[in-house]
Amino acid sequence: MAKIIAVANQKGGVGKTTTAVNLSACLAYIGKKVLLVDIDPQGNATSGVGVEKGDVDECVYDILVEDVEAIDVIRSTSVERLDVLPSTIQLSGAEIELVPTISREVRLKRALSTVSDNYDYIFIDCPPSLGLLTINALTASDSVLIPVQCEYYALEGLSQLLNTVRLVQKHLNTNLEIEGVLLTMLDARTNLGIQVIEEVKKYFREKVFDTIIPRNVRLGEAPSHGQPIITYDAKSRGAEVYVDLAKEVVTSGERVR
Ligand code: ADP
Ligand code: MG
């Protein structure tokens, strides 16, 4: 059975999609079987692994709202061992359409349970909100990975996210854990970055990943080529750090077992 990890933070632009895409691809690169689930209607994770949104006829919307089987929507990618469950803009309607439906919070969980045996890891790239789609992701997951951008007000809004995590733990998924807090887009040339690292570590302590993601031009470029960093530029600093993060995720999982 796969370990399922939601990548969540209701703030936009903190590195959720970059992390979901590149951590998935780097785990595949080091030999794991990985499914990347895109539940953001913007579909950036989908295009980030080279799937044209225009070519997608059935997406995660059809799984959540139309009861289509996950296996029929999953696609392979150009990265060996990496599959994707794509999203399209159609998913933006799901948040409202799901409201009056039965078991609306557990639909993704049920869908993923049918394919979980095919993978070592499943990553869910969440939208920038704490609505029903993110609740579905947290309910389906073993843990949540929280990217935090190294900037002023880095911790702002995190109490809301942690509160949502606690509510999901209480009512929907008692096993949900915090996988870790990932510091992203560090600009090593400024003191601000160092201050933010200290502040976040004071608050989250051992929950902060040792790997810190720096700002890296190649990481920013890769999505426009529809490629994860590991195939776009394997020698870049960005590829190096996401491979480090992949290894850290594997090792921490082994420690728990
Ligand atoms: P989110 O999914 O949280 O909204 P993204 O992963 O889409 O955030 O990142 C926001 C923007 O920042 C994107 O244009 C992305 O390419 C860029 N970006 C993310 N991480 C880095 C990084 N480490 N270095 C350079 N650019 C980055
Ligand atoms: Mg995103």
Image (spheres, grey):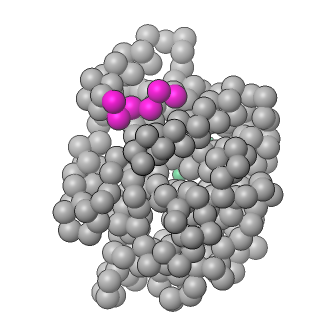
Q: Position of residue 81 (x, y in %)?
A: 73, 58
> With 153 as the anchor, is 107 left or right in this view?
right
Is residue 210 highlighted in magenta?
yes
* Residue drawn where x is 60% and y is 63% of the image: 119
Seen from the viewer's position, the closer of residues 8 and 33 is 33
**Left or right for 200, reference 76:** left
Of residues 180 and 39, the one nearer the viewer is 180
Query: Could you say which quadrant of the image residue 156 lies in?
Result: top left
**Residue at position x 44%, y 78% in the image:** 110
Along the line of sight, the residue nearer the viewer: 212 or 92: 212
Q: Is residue 50 visible?
A: no
Whole-percent x, y for residue 142 in the image:
40, 58
**Magenta stretch: dominant secondary structure:** loop
Whether 233 is among the magenta residues is no
- Identify the residue at image location x=45%, y=55%: 6
Q: Is residue 81 left or right of residue 145?
A: right
Name the residue: 43% across, 40% down: 255
Tell me: residue 144, above or below residue 175: above
Toward the viewer: 87 or 181? 181
Question: Can see residue 82?
Answer: yes
- Say which quarter of the image contains residue 221: top right
Question: Where is residue 175 shown, x and y percent of the image?
Answer: 30, 60
Q: Which residue extends farthest front?
A: 257
* Tag count: 0
3 w.r.t. 208: above or below? below
In the rendered image, which quarter is residue 209 located in?
Answer: top left
In the rendered image, residue 205, in percent from the top left (x then y), is placed at: 30, 28
Which stretch did the figure color magenta? 206-211
